[in-house]
Amino acid sequence: MAATHNETDRVTISLPHSLALDVESLRSDLKISRSELFKVAVERFIADQRRASLQTVVAEMAEEYRSNAELTSLTALDGEDFI
């Protein structure tokens, strides 16, 4: 059975000193490595951006549905009394 290999990339970043101090304090409080802290933060940021992007698309689609008569022409048949 072949072992799985998780590749990682080394990334160098620059932070304002006050932010670096906050990172170090939080990392220490959480008892995790700096790498783990940044990994979690970036994963959450990416998820938030994807969610925001999806919400924008959903809002655009909802507006298109409301304003496009072809899409809503059968809406009257959607009532609970429809058999």
Image (tube, helix red, strand yellow):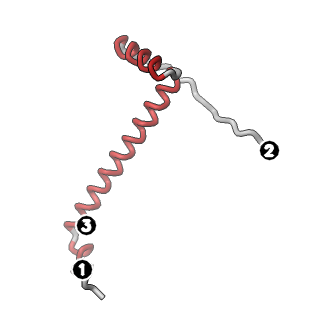
Residue 8 in the image, given as x and y percentages of width and height: 60, 30
Which disc, if any, is residue 47? none
Ranked by sequence position, the earlier of labels 2 and 1 is: 2
Q: Is residue 46 above or below residue 56?
A: above
* Residue 74 visible, this orientation: no
State the CA–CA distance, disc 2 to disc 1: 57 Å
Query: Which residue is most to the right?
Result: 1
Say above or below: 35 vs 42: above
The answer to whether mark 3 and mark 2 are in CB contact below 8 A is no
The residue indicated by pointer 3 is 65
The mark total stands at 3
Q: Which residue is mark 1?
A: 79
The residue under the point 50% across, 21% down is: 31
Query: Where in the figure is residue 29, as x and y percent of width and height?
Result: 44, 19
Neighbour class for label 3 at 10 Å: few (<14), some, many (≥20)?
few
- The quarter of the picture where the N terminus appears is top right
Circle 2 Cα neighbour tier, 10 Å, few/some/many (<14 / 14–19 / ≥20) = few
10 and 27: which is toward the camera: 27
Mark 3 or mark 2, whichever is nearer to me: 2
